Amino acid sequence: MKARVGCCGWQYDDWVGPFYPPEKRDRKGEWLEYFGRFFDCVEIDSSFYSVPGQHTVNAWVQKGKRIGGFEFSLKMNQDITHLKMVEGSAGDAVAKARDFETFVCHPLADNGLLGAVLLQLSPYFPMAGKDLRSNMPVLKHVLEGLDTDKYRYVVEFRHRTWLDSGRNEIVPEALELLRARNAAVCILDGPGFPTTHAQTADHAYVRFHGRNEDIWFKKEKPEGDTRINRYDYLYKEEELNPWVDELRSIDERAREVRVVFNNHGHAKAVQNGLQFRKMLGVEAPGKESAIPKKITLDSF
């Protein structure tokens, strides 16, 4: 199998101890290269909140080169997906997306370090708005404005109106838009959205969010709950087992497969990522396959 398995992010303070050695607590500049000893890919979440500057992108490039055999997937900035697209301002969304491609995607791609680009749609971006205006043309305009020949795009749907009548797959019209641009449907495991199975591109992208259904949509946790947030969840092996066959099926149909774990609380994504890579029989060349025992005895 040719899948890459990684995590969503690496800059979490609560990973010190469970994953990062305690002596690295105040040396955050070393965290990415330490992470790269174990994984061959990572999804950058910070690019969603603010567009990274040239200095930051250059730092990723230099560290990625030192790690070797590593790649970054990027989350498209929220101004595009959660503001301009929600407003219906497709032209502005495309303009901002092209800037994102030029200043963030291109330097990574030019150095062989870019994985996929995630277009995570807003949960407030339904297939049709309250005024009954279809958002399909907005999605179509944005996809057509992206350089999908050069970059591997992934679309994550988050509003249930994008589901078909069976409520278990994306509507055919949207799938056709993605197929026309070789953009992949993001495959999800988590409480927020059903797991869909359509493949619309020659590459695939799977995100594991955890299964904290009880607090997924709540702002407050039960008294005495030690979970950091809704992503603080450790998958059991029996929960990951069905995904092994699913990934093998995807692997047969896709040229490239990327799997990222977003259950980041207390570095649970690290444990599940390494565990799942082993279950898939995927070895990342030159990467360590287990976290040092002295760090992991009671970490999770």
Image: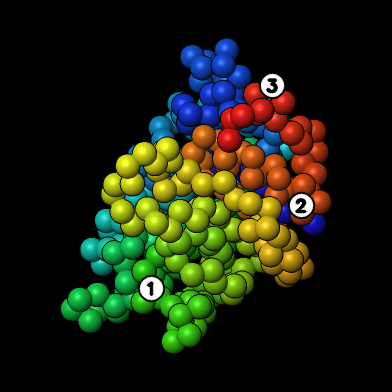
Identify residue for label 3. Answer: 294
| Residue plotted at (56% across, 16% down) | 22
Residue 135 image offset from top left, x and y in percent:
32, 74
Mark 1 surroundings within 10 Å by alpha-carbon count, few (fewer than 14), some (14 through 19), many (20 or more)? some
Residue 114, picture quadrant: top right
Going by the numbered disc 1, the residue's amino acid type is: Arg
Question: In what element is the residue under mark 3?
Answer: helix
Which image quadrant is residue 163 in?
Answer: bottom left
Viewer-side label of 1, 2: 2
Residue in the image at 64% along x and 40% along y: 271
Would residue 162 be visible to someone looking at this image? yes
**Which residue: 45% across, 61% down?**
191
> Please, what is the three-letter code of the amino acid marked with disc 2?
Met
State the CA–CA distance, disc 1 to disc 3: 44 Å
The Cα–Cα distance between marks 1 and 2, rounded to whole angstroms, is 31 Å
Whole-Å distance between the Cαs marked 2 and 3? 23 Å
Marked residue nearer the N-terminal end (1 or 3): 1
- 34 to 22, vertically: above or below: below
Residue 294 placement, left or right of 45: right
Task: Please tell me which of labels 2 and 3 falls first in the chain.
Answer: 2
Q: Is residue 82 left or right of residue 192?
A: left
Question: What number is the disc on residue 160?
Answer: 1
- Residue 5 x/y as whole percent: 67, 47
Frontmost of labels 2 and 3 is 3
Residue 279 - label: 2
Colouring convention used in this rendered image of the protein: rainbow
Instruction: Look at discs 1 and 3 and give the one toward the viewer.
Output: 3
